[in-house]
Image: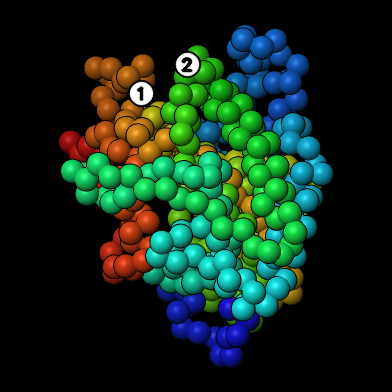
Amino acid sequence: MGDLEDFDHAFIQAPEHRPKLALSDADGIPTIDLSPIFNSVPGTDFPHHLVQQIASACTEWGFFLVVNHGVPPEKRRRIEAAAREFFGQSLEEKRKVRRNEWVVTGYFDTELTKNVRDWKEVFDFVVEDPTVIPASSDPDDTELTQLVNQWPEYPPEFGEICEGYVEELEKLGHKLMELIANSLGLPGKRFRDYFKGQTSSVRLNHYPLCPSPELALGVGRHKDPGVLTVLAQDDIGGLEVRRKRDGAWIQVKPVPDSFVVNVGDITQVWSNEKYESVEHRATVNSKRDRYSIAFFFYPSHSTIVEPLEELIGPQNPPKYKPYSFGKFLASRKRSNFKKLNVDNIQISDFKITT
Ligand SMILES: O=C(O)CCC(=O)C(=O)O
Ligand SMILES: [Fe+2]
């Protein structure tokens, strides 16, 4: 991206999607203190007030911040430093671990979100190495394939640092899902088995300085397709969330040592829309570049995603048809390369319309 001379038209958002000065909502995105979960007796439900906070954050915003989350600060600092070292290299070096048609992990700097280019460069890795997913999106094809990581030579120990971070994020992800389960009136371990053979991944984002931040976005508006996303953002700011109440874009102010959590599309389906996956985007700026690290918590490829049976009934019929998460992933992966001029597969494709 650094080799851009003039402002490339591929990055220009349609006027209605260009970032305006986002509102800040003083009592906006809630901050939730997770310390009670480390003090509660294993095997018992979490304190009622904590579960209540999760329920209202998920219902009203689909987004919340967590503090006292149990992730050791040094593990976060190490991966943040490693990301800076990695992205600080020449494009030639970074492209040595470039994503390609066969290896979907590694470095990538030409992502399109809704067919407009994002002002960013990323490095992706999978949590389970290898990760098993279907070879194709064809429902009759039972062949599987493996996603493997590719690690750069520099900085040294990059792979170990990333793995050390993810180990902690996975623990946090499970805790958050226990809280979400309780908040839906379900037992804490309700979601656990879906993650055996998880397809989770991590994306290191770098948003370079942008000469025309009013025309482009670091990431265009989108929803996350997984169960849950846990984001570490630096102190620059730029993440914006669509407020459910009125559709206004609200900034998520950086809070040191916090993580931003949002529920993804799978949680929307599982909860039969009690919780919704909310649109978000990232703006860029011309003064300071920005970094973030997203942990995408995804279930096993064999998961059939559908509204949970405990949450549906005659008064609350299922709003979605079951779909295979593996086939969904395979279809997304294919569209990354073919760049067909159609939207990615979405959960709305499985919505039951009455
Ligand atoms: O970097 C950010 O603030 C948001 C990133 C994001 O939404 C994503 O990677 O899915
Ligand atoms: Fe996202």
Percent x, y of residue 271: 40, 28
**Where in the figure is residue 135, as x and y percent of width and height?**
31, 50
Measured as percent of width and height from the top left, residue 125 is found at 56, 52
Under mark 1, the amino acid is Leu
- Identify the mark nearer the N-term, 1 or 2: 2
Q: Amino acid at mark 2?
A: Leu
Residue 308 shown left or right of residue 280 in the figure: left
Q: Label 1 CB, ligand 2: below 8 Å?
A: no
Q: Examine the image and state in which quarter residue 307 appears.
A: top left
Pointer 1 and pointer 2: residues touching (CB < 8 Å)? Answer: yes
Q: Nearer the viewer, residue 67 or 164?
A: 164
Q: Secondary structure at mark 2?
A: loop
Say above or below: 32 vs 265.
above
Q: What residue is drawn where x is 62% and y is 58%?
A: 151
User: Where in the figure is residue 178, as x and y percent of width and height?
Assistant: 56, 23
Residue 32 position (above or below residue 131): above
Q: Is mark 2 within 8 Å of ligand 2?
A: no
In the rendered image, the quadrant that contains the N terminus is bottom right
The residue to which callout 1 is attached is 308
Which mark is drawn over residue 242? none
Camera-side residue of 74 and 100: 100
In which image quadrant can residue 23 be found? bottom right
- Between residue 104 and residue 325, name the one nearer to us: 104
Q: Is residue 64 above or below residue 5?
A: above
Front in this rendered view, residue 231 or 273: 231
- Residue in the image at 65% along x and 37% along y: 167
Q: Residue at x 65, y 18 (%)?
A: 49
Q: Which mark is residue 186?
A: 2
Q: Is residue 157 visible?
A: yes
Q: CA distance from mark 1 to mark 2?
A: 10 Å
Residue plotted at (59% across, 60% down): 123
Tell me if mark 1 has few (under 14), some (14-19) or many (20+) residues whose alpha carbon lies within 10 angstroms of its own: few
